[in-house]
Amino acid sequence: MNVKFFLDTADLAEIEEAASWGALAGVTTNPTLYSRIGGKLDDFHAHIKRICDIVGPDCPVSAESVAMTRDEIVRDGRELAAIAPNVVVKIPTMVEGLAATRALADEGIPVNMTLCFTVPQAILAARAGARYISPFVGRFDDISEDGLAQLDDVVRAIGNYDFSEDTVNGEQIEIIAASIRSANHVTQAALMGADIATVPFGILKKCVQHPLTDRGLESFLKDWEKVQNA
């Protein structure tokens, strides 16, 4: 399995641009991200459909439920999953979320358990049938703790065991490095074996750029101009 990039956004223009680069493997979004671009909750499902149409059926699109009780999360999850076959229901790591994840997984609906911070939470998510588990990096850093160390612990712990009997169709669990704040976070996540880095568009652009690349391009263009003018 190779490391993949998911884009963390609700902005269609950003998704279209990133998809055009040929390296986008999925999208994660939620109503909060949608509200930041002027979206309303009652139009969220329609917006998810637009995202799915852009990225195509082979790119998973994680769409977060805003419900808080297990029955409401299951109902919301079913509605989200009905939008397109590549929708993944995003559910917070909590007691009600675990119960809802088990119910949805038993129905063949993939779940991305988000807001995961510890190894025990990740193991519980795996046993509940989560297809993806999203440990948060940046939010640990926000409280002066080592988010990358926590991510490394989760990657190694989940990799120690076979959870295929718990997941939908026996699929392998993928660890998503979430709450990414820098290109270095992406580098470290890849080195420690995270399956996916889900990043804002600005960070994805920084992953492409480097000062030495820019200088190399400038030098190449100057040399080429000399050749043209010779």
Image (tube, grey):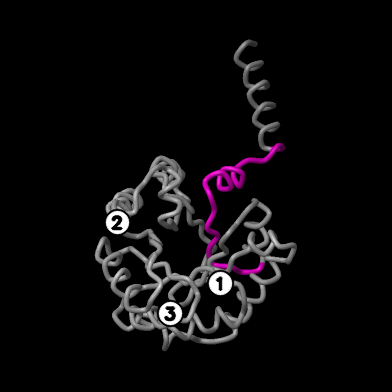
Few, some or many residues within 10 Å of mark 2 (<14, 14–19, 20+): some
Q: What residue is rendered at 32% in x and 78% in y? A: 71
Query: What distance separates the C-alpha of mark 3 from that of mark 1?
Result: 14 Å
Magenta span covers which residues? 192-212
Give the residue displayed 28% in from the left and 71% down from the top: 78
What residue is shown with label 1?
Answer: 116
Could you say where residue 79 lies in the image, as x and y percent from the top left? Answer: 26, 66
Residue 180 painted magenta = no
Q: Circles 2 and 1: CB distance less than 8 Å?
A: no
Nearest to N terminus: mark 3 or mark 2: 2
On the rendered structure, is 51 left or right of 22?
A: left
How far apart marks 2 and 1 lie (CA) works out to 24 Å
Q: What's the amino acid at mark 3?
A: Glu
Q: Earlier in the sequence, mark 3 or mark 1?
A: 3
Q: Amino acid at mark 1?
A: Cys
Label number found at residue 96 = 3
Q: Nearer the viewer, residue 38 or 141?
A: 38
Q: Residues within 10 Å of mark 1 (few under 14, many from 20)?
A: many
User: Hey, which quadrant is residue 108 in on the image?
Assistant: bottom left
- Residue 107 lies, with reference to residue 58, above or below; the image says below
Toward the top, the furthest residue is 229
From the viewer's perspective, tell me whether residue 184 is left or right of residue 93.
Answer: right
Q: State the SS at label 3.
A: helix
Q: Residue at x 47, y 86 (%)?
A: 127
The numbered mark at residue 45 is 2
Q: Nearer the viewer, mark 3 or mark 2?
A: 3
